[in-house]
């Protein structure tokens, strides 16, 4: 093979890897396969199962992907308890006061040492950081594959090189969800801890008071948290198990509708108790209501 044929072959291979993504996510196993495909390799590496989770190698991708996967499992345990306490039980009891007793009874278990760091803080931090590092690793792999490490940004644009990996829905929703979760944790956990030394007095009544006092901020923030969170959880489970639809045939479309249907159902159940019951609980009176007002006054932008 002469040099021109070799160059043409290499250009064809690069162009094939730069095809625009389809409306449905790229199959995770294909994404992983292309990521580790070296430019000069005569044949692609052995195909792995889901996201490289059963591959024989032990690269940084192997460990980072496992960290991201299993940290999400740990946090899901907490999220299940939390959604049950703050949404499903209120939906069943139709009473904020009655539901508060269940919350205050079970919450000390997952807000204690070492369960809170193990089920909440550490898994969330691990999940976010490992995801960010995976994207950086894939970017660096693309730079090496295209020989673009020493090429300026303007030259990359002129040559149409796509250095950063495509953003899937599960990844995009994760980035949107991060500040929403941090804001929720700040208001309901960190703020009471700073000003009252703990959140023993902060229950569903505190949330109801916030909805009644600041309906737009509380309602918008909660609705966004639930909608994005439900989608991220369901699509994340689908991605880890290799259920993400590929292509545009009937089977892929049916799977796409099924996953989104489950996400909508989860979000609707979550909101039914959260917005429908807790969100309509009303203001707290007396010294408790004044204490809640004082805490909410410390939240940035709420009183603007």
Image: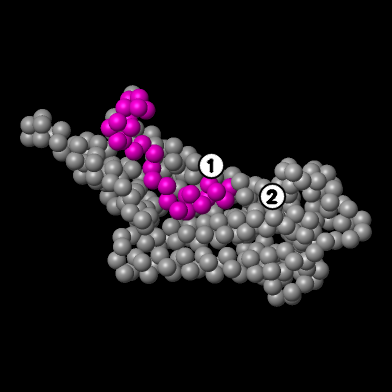
Q: Within 10 angstroms of label 1, few (less than 14), some, or many (20 or more) residues? A: some
Residue pointed to by mark 2: 185
The spot of residue 62 in percent (x, y) is 42, 46
Whichever of callouts 2 and 1 sits on the residue coming sooner in the sequence is: 1
Q: Which label lies toward us, 2 or 1?
A: 2
User: Where 237 sits versus 130, above or below?
Assistant: below
Marks 2,1: beta carbons within 8 A: no
Quadrant of the drawing holding the N terminus: top left
**Magenta stretch: includes residue 166:** yes
Residue at the spot x=53%, y=42% of the render?
Answer: 129
Residue 105 is marked as none
Q: Within 10 angstroms of label 2, few (less than 14), some, or many (20 or more) residues? A: few
Q: Which residues are magenta?
A: 151-178
Q: Rounded to the nearest whole Å, what is the CA distance between mark 2 and mark 1?
A: 18 Å
Residue 116 seen in this snapshot: no
The spot of residue 186 in percent (x, y) is 71, 47
Residue at the spot x=32%, y=25% of the render?
Answer: 151
Left or right of 67: which side holds 161? left
**Magenta stretch: includes residue 193:** no
User: Where 38 sits versus 116, above or below?
Assistant: above
Residue 163 seen in this snapshot: yes
User: Where 202 sits versus 262, above or below?
Assistant: above
Residue pointed to by mark 1: 129
């Amino acid at each position: 093979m002469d040099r021109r044929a070799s160059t043409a072959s290499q250009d064809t291979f690069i162009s094939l890897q730069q095809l625009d993504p389809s409306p449905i996510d790229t199959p995770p196993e294909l994404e992983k396969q292309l990521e580790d495909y070296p430019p000069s390799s005569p044949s692609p590496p052995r195909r792995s199962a889901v996201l490289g989770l059963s591959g024989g190698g032990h690269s940084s991708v192997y460990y980072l992907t496992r960290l991201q996967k299993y940290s999400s499992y740990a946090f899901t345990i907490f999220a299940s308890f939390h959604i049950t306490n703050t949404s499903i039980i209120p939906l069943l009891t139709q009473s904020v006061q009655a539901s508060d007793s269940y919350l205050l009874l079970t919450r000390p278990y997952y807000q204690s040492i070492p369960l809170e760091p193990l089920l909440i803080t550490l898994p969330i931090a691990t999940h976010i950081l490992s995801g960010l590092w995976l994207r950086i690793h894939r970017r660096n792999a693309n730079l090496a594959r295209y020989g673009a490490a020493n090429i300026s940004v303007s030259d990359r644009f002129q040559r149409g090189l796509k250095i950063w990996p495509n953003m899937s829905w599960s990844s995009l929703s994760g980035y949107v969800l991060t500040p929403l979760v941090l804001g929720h944790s700040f208001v309901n956990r960190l703020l009471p801890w700073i000003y009252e030394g703990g959140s023993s007095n902060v229950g569903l009544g505190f949330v109801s008071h916030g909805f009644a006092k600041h309906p737009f901020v509380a309602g918008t923030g909660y609705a966004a948290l639930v909608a994005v969170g439900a989608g991220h959880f369901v699509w994340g489970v689908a991605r880890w198990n290799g259920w993400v639809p590929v292509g545009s045939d009937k089977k892929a479309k049916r799977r796409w509708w099924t996953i989104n249907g489950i996400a909508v159902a989860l979000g609707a159940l979550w909101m039914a108790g959260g917005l429908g019951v807790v969100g309509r609980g009303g203001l707290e009176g007396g010294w408790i209501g004044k204490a809640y007002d004082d805490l909410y006054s410390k939240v940035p932008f709420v009183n603007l």
